Image (cartoon, rainbow, N blue to C red):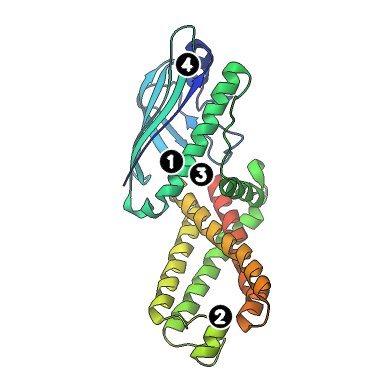
Amino acid sequence: MRIDVLNSRVVDAPPERLAPLLDGLGAPGDRLWPVRQWPKAIMSLQRPLRPGSRGSHGGLTYSVTGYEPGRRLDFASEPGNGLHGTFSVAVDGPPGGPSTVSVPMAVEVAPRLRPIAPLVRVVHHAVVEDLLDNAERAATGSVARPRRAPAWLRALTGAELLLGGGVDGHGEGLGRAGAVGAPAVLLALAGVHAGWALGWRWPGTDDRSWADRVIGADVPPPSAAACWTVAAGLTAAAGAVASAASGRGGRPARLAGRLVAAAFAARGAAGPVDSLARGLDSPYRRLDVALYSPLCLAIAAGTFAAVARGARRPH
């Protein structure tokens, strides 16, 4: 799978005004990279800038393949990222302006990351649009049309910062608890589903009473194949969260961890709304409000904290 994207912005300023921003990318005092919006994915570039200089952001590592001072920086990803390809940051335009700031990216997505390729694309777009906002603001003093991230992405980023203690690194205790607790609970739930696939009928006594408590009276009992599928998915989710919490796997692992957290947060938030709207006249809905949905929200919170902790660990 390939991702080819081009983000660009026409800025009402001459290229020479934008040149220092490009030359300062990834250095202390960087005014171009969106540090405030993405404090867990700050760009760092070796100095002096030249072909071969290494850089990283959010666990993604790469090297400089071309540098034209004040005009263009080209990068190629390093092996093991799960994203193999190139990206650039370029400033073009006549001496008096206006200028065009462009950020093209062309990468091949490794098979293990293909399920979250749409999320990779959305996050990349959001980061680059924030970068373009910074370029326009620094060169002109304002942004005509500021980029607005999707609400769900802002919620994910905000939750990660909140549970991870923000950029100053507090909240390490919650991060450690999430790093251990979230994968453990996911594996325990996988074991429960495997037991159901093998014929265990807790918390009921037979197929019907079991289904009434775990999925609802108006739905057929789940098949063994469905239970095995959920067990496999929960096991994979536990592995993704553990990898993200340890700092292994870099940005792709954190994206997978955030996706797990988002799924459980959505389930935990939607469950009580539906159950309360339909009435608490069934065992499943009562259990959903009292146990299932709160458990999903706890898993989401622990996963967010674990991912935030992993982002702070050395890569």
Disc 3/disc 2 C-alpha distance (Å): 46 Å
* Pointer 2 residue: 216
Q: Secondary structure at mark 2?
A: loop
Q: Amino acid at mark 2?
A: Gly
The residue most toward the top is 96
Indicate which disc, 3 or 2, sits on the residue closer to the N terminus: 2
Q: Nearer the viewer, residue 155 or 187?
A: 155
Residue 30 visible from this viewpoint = no
* Closer mark to the observer between disc 1 and disc 2: 2
Indicate which disc, 4 or 3, sits on the residue closer to the N terminus: 4
* Pointer 1 residue: 60
Return the x and y of residue 297 as percentages of the image width and height. Answer: 62, 63
* Closer mark to the observer between disc 4 and disc 3: 4
Q: Locate residue 134: give its quadrant.
A: top right
* Pointer 4 residue: 99
Disc 1/disc 3 C-alpha distance (Å): 12 Å
Disc 4/disc 1 C-alpha distance (Å): 29 Å
Q: Label 3 near label 4: C-beta < 8 Å?
A: no
Q: Label 3 near label 1: C-beta < 8 Å?
A: no
Q: Which residue shows up at 52% across the image and 25% down it?
A: 27
Q: Amino acid at mark 3?
A: Pro
Q: Amino acid at mark 4?
A: Ser
* Pointer 3 residue: 314
Q: Secondary structure at mark 4?
A: strand
- Side of 18 relative to 140 (left or right): left
Disc count in the image? Answer: 4
Return the x and y of residue 83 as percentages of the image width and height. Answer: 36, 43
Indicate which disc, 1 or 3, sits on the residue closer to the N terminus: 1
- Circle 3 packing at 10 Å, graded few (<14), some (14-19), many (20+), is few
Above or below, 15 against 38 in this view is above
Return the x and y of residue 184 as percentages of the image width and height. Answer: 53, 68
